[in-house]
Image (tube, rainbow, N blue to C red):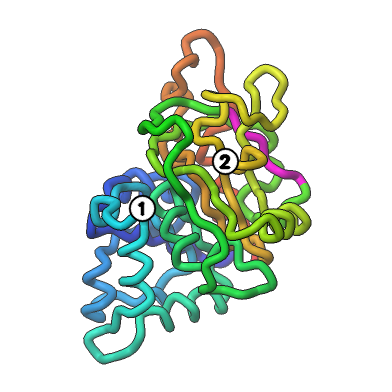
Amino acid sequence: MNPVKAVSITGHGSNCEAESAYAAKMAGADVSDIVYFFDLTAGRVRLADYNFLIFPGGFLDGDDLGAGQAAAVRWRYAKTASGDALLDQLTGFFHNGGLVLGICNGFQLLVKLGLLPALGGRYFERQVSLANNDSARFEDRWVTLAANPASPCVFTRGVGVIDLPVRHGEGKLVPGSEEILNEIVAGNLHALQYVDPDTKKPTQDYPANPNGSPLAIAGLTDPTGRILGLMPHPEAYNDKTNHPGWTRGEGTALGLTLLENGVRYLKQR
C-alpha cells in the first residue's frame, strides 16, 4: 500500500490546523504534519513531499475583504525563495494525484482560488463564492448532512447521513449564475447537503440549513472527486463523545469517516 502523507497548512489566521492534523492521523495517515505557509515560500517544505493537503478552518487574514479572499491572492501570486511560483507547486500536487480537503475557511479559500467547482475542468477560474449567512450572524451549531451518492467525491463514498458542527459567518454558496448552479447539479458536484434531521431531506429551513445555501449545498467537489470543500467541520467529530447527544445514544458516523475515505483512496491507488 502507498504511504499517506498529510499536511495541514497554517499561518495568517488558521486556527484548526492541529485538530485537522490529528484527524488525519486518526484516519490512518502515515505522516500528518502541520506546515506554515511561510515554510512553503521559504523553500523549507514542498507540497511534493505530501499527497493529502488540508486547508483547515480559521479566520484567514481576519476575513478582511471577504473570507479567504486575501489568502487566495497570496496563493495565486506567491513565489518561493528560489523564485518559483507557489501556484505551480499546488498545480503539480493535484496533477500528481494528490487529494485536497478544504474545511470551512479552507472551503472559502478553495472557491475563491477557483479550485472548486472547476466546471469543465477550468481550474483557478472563480465560478462560485461564499457569502454572509442569511441569518446575518455567526452560526455555531450541529447540523445534519446527506452525501450525494452520485457524486464522484472520494471523501463522501458510502457516507449516507452524518452529523457535523458548523461555525461560520460566511457559508452561503453563491454561484456566478443560474447556469453554473445547474452545471453543479448536472455533474453531481454538490457532494453534501444540509438536511432536515427528521426527514433526512435537503432543506432551506433555518436552522437545519444554517446559511441559506441554494439547494442546501454544504460541500462541493470537483469533476475528479479529489477535491472536497465543505463548511461543516469533520475534524471536530473525532470521537462519539463530541456529539451533543451522545449520552442519549444519539450520533452518526464520525466526521473522521470523510478523512478515512481519503486515506483509503490514497493507500489503494
Which is more toward the observer, 228 or 183? 183
Helix, strand or loop under label 2: loop
Q: Is residue 112 above or below residue 171?
A: below
The first of marks 1 and 2 along the sequence is: 1
User: Residue 13 appears at what percent x and percent y?
Assistant: 24, 53
Image point 38% across, 48% down: which residue? 20
Find disc 2 in the rendering and name its residue: 213
User: Residue 243 appears at what percent x and percent y?
Assistant: 46, 22
Q: Is residue 173 above or below residue 51?
A: above
Which is more toward the observer, 37 or 30? 37
Determine the image quadrant of residue 228. bottom right
Q: Kindly identify which numbered label has been placed on residue 67.
A: 1
Query: Disc 1 marks which amino acid?
Result: Ala
Q: Quadrant of the C terminus?
A: bottom right
Residue 130 lies within the magenta run: no
Helix, strand or loop under label 1: loop
Q: Is residue 82 above or below residue 40?
A: below
Report, in whole angstroms, how far the alpha carbon at label 1 lies from the one at label 2: 16 Å
Mark 1: few, some, or many residues within 10 Å (few <14, many ≥20)? many
Mark 2: few, some, or many residues within 10 Å (few <14, many ≥20)? many
Q: Quadrant of the N terminus?
A: bottom right
Residue 145 lies within the magenta run: yes
- Is residue 174 found left or right of 40 in the rendered image? right
Q: Which residues are magenta?
A: 144-149
Image point 36% across, 48% down: which residue? 57
- Is residue 141 found left or right of 187 in the rendered image? left
Query: Disc 2 marks which amino acid?
Result: Ser
